[in-house]
Amino acid sequence: MSAPSAPASAALAGLLGRCPACGRGRLFKGYIAVPPACDACGLDYGFADSGDGPAVFVMLIAGFLALGFVLWVEFTYEPPYWLHLVVSLPVTLAICLALLRVFKGVLIALQYKHDAAEGRLER
């Protein structure tokens, strides 16, 4: 394999869903599943454990955006409650799904860049 060339930035690699080491391989297999290794440079993705970090950011940001959308619809059109559900739930779901992959990619790329890992006790 050729020597990996580092991407322009870890955040950009994460946003694009690319390997944080080489910037060419895919970071995801499917929607948010992480493969065992990079298909371009062979980087072992065993370190990639974003945990609940992406979900927390997505909940905070999507909640803010969804609430703004719901309030705008309410004050602009004053629809019945059932129409709020029919319109607002899919919009909220779309916002969450759009942000989840992006935040997971960025957090994994930053974890690689800063060599972050779980805390370990020294013995």
Image (cartoon, rainbow, N blue to C red):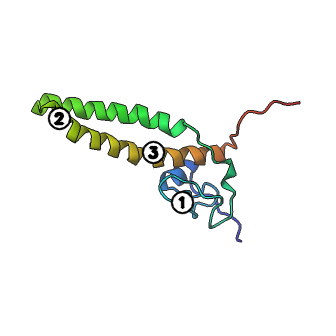
Give the Cα distance between marks 3 and 1.
14 Å
| Local SS, label 2 | helix
* Residue in view at x 55 percent, y 36 percent: 52
Q: Which of the pair 99/92 is nearer the observer?
A: 92
Identity of the residue drawn at 68% across and 48% down: 47
Q: Position of residue 19 (x, y in %)?
A: 59, 58
The mark that comes first in sequence, 1 or 2, is: 1
Q: Mark 3 points at which residue?
A: 100
Q: Where is residue 58 in the image (x, y as percent from the top left)?
A: 43, 37
Query: Considering only vertical position in the picture, is 47 above or below 76?
Result: below
Closer to the chain start, of discs 3 and 2, is: 2
Query: In percent of the image, x 58 and y 54: which residue is there?
Result: 34
Q: Looking at the rendered structure, which numbered label has been put on residue 29?
A: 1
Quadrant containing the N terminus in the rendered view: bottom right
Q: Quadrant of residue 63?
A: top left
Tell me, yes or no, whether the two marked residues, 3 and 1, touch with CB atoms within 8 Å: no
Q: In this view, does 13 lie to the left or right of 1?
A: left
User: Number of numbered discs present?
Assistant: 3
CB of mark 1 within 8 Å of CB of mark 2? no
Give, as a three-letter code, the residue at label 2. Trp
Q: What element carries label 3?
A: helix
The quarter of the picture where residue 91 lies is top left
